[in-house]
Amino acid sequence: MRNSFANQLPASRPFGIDNLDINATVTVRIATPQDIPEMIRLERQCSTAAHWTDQQYGSLWAAQERSTRLALIAERGMSAASGDLIPTLIGFLVARHLAPEWELENIVVAPDSRRSGIGTRLMEELLARAKQTNSDAVFLEVRESNAAAQAVYHKLDFKQIGCRKSYYANPIEDAILYSKPLRTNLTRP
Ligand SMILES: CC(C)(COP(=O)(O)OP(=O)(O)OC[C@H]1O[C@@H](n2cnc3c(N)ncnc32)[C@H](O)[C@@H]1OP(=O)(O)O)[C@@H](O)C(=O)NCCC(=O)NCCS
């Protein structure tokens, strides 16, 4: 039986976000089924995120899906009245591994935590983990009007590779396709 890819991944590691003012340590870790309610709560706040049913979130951990799915959580400690730091979910990413490629399925950062490098950090974590699987490329699609997400992908050197006409519904809109190769091209001109 094939093991869960996500379960083989290294444990979470902390990193500093310079311009967050509350408890500046943000952690990226592998998601667990206990994160589902907070993932759904955040996704439902964000109209441009991919919207899934509760069952679709639950199926990320189903036996037949686990080996191909990577779900990452970004969280930071928020001060409670007691003085304790309560880990609070501020972003997540879901990607699928269909060897030799990866597809980004969703990325969401809480509105009050945007423009602090968290989306970039989640994407960098995906790229690093995808490289560990000896894969060729990461692919994604995004609404043509979603300038914020496209800016993140451009910053990470994703290249536009196509367009799917009227791909999205509610409202109908084209999808822009992006990819980023993971292998260094060693051929010389
Ligand atoms: C897309 C999204 C995940 C980006 O997350 P984020 O944490 O704000 O992204 P970052 O802080 O890492 O931004 C990295 C860079 O992207 C660019 N960028 C991000 N948001 C931007 C915006 N609203 N306008 C212009 N550029 C933007 C900037 O170059 C930014 O770097 P800078 O802040 O140093 O200028 C977030 O806006 C989001 O959750 N949107 C709603 C859900 C969504 O649309 N998901 C994409 C589905 S395909």
Image (cartoon, rainbow, N blue to C red):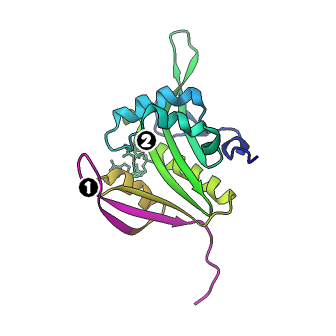
Q: Secondary structure at mark 2?
A: strand
Q: Residue at x 48, y 38 (%)?
A: 56
Look at label 1 and name its amino acid.
Answer: Glu
Is the residue 155 above or below the residue 92 in the image? below
Residue 158 seen in render: no
In the current view of this chain or complex, which residue is farthest to the bottom? Answer: 189
- Would the CB of label 1 be found within 8 Å of ligand 1? no
Q: Residue at x 50, y 10 (%)?
A: 81
Q: Nearer the viewer, residue 1 or 61?
A: 1
Residues marked 1 and 2 touching at CB (< 8 Å): no
Q: Quadrant of residue 141?
A: bottom left
Q: Nearer the viewer, residue 90 or 85?
A: 90
Look at label 2 and name its amino acid.
Answer: Val
Across and down, in percent, residue 146 comes to 31, 52
Q: Residue at x 74, y 48 (%)?
A: 2
Q: Which residue is mark 2?
A: 108
Badge 2: few (under 14), some or many (20 or more) residues near its Cα, within 10 Å?
many
Is the residue 49 above or below the residue 54 in the image? below
Q: Is residue 153 left or right of residue 163?
A: right
Does the magenta run of residues contain 173?
Answer: yes
Q: Which residue is mark 1?
A: 173
Q: Quadrant of residue 14?
A: top right
Q: Of the residues under marks 1 and 2, which one precedes in the sequence?
A: 2
Across and down, in percent, residue 105 comes to 47, 49
User: Which segment did they paint magenta?
Assistant: 162-189
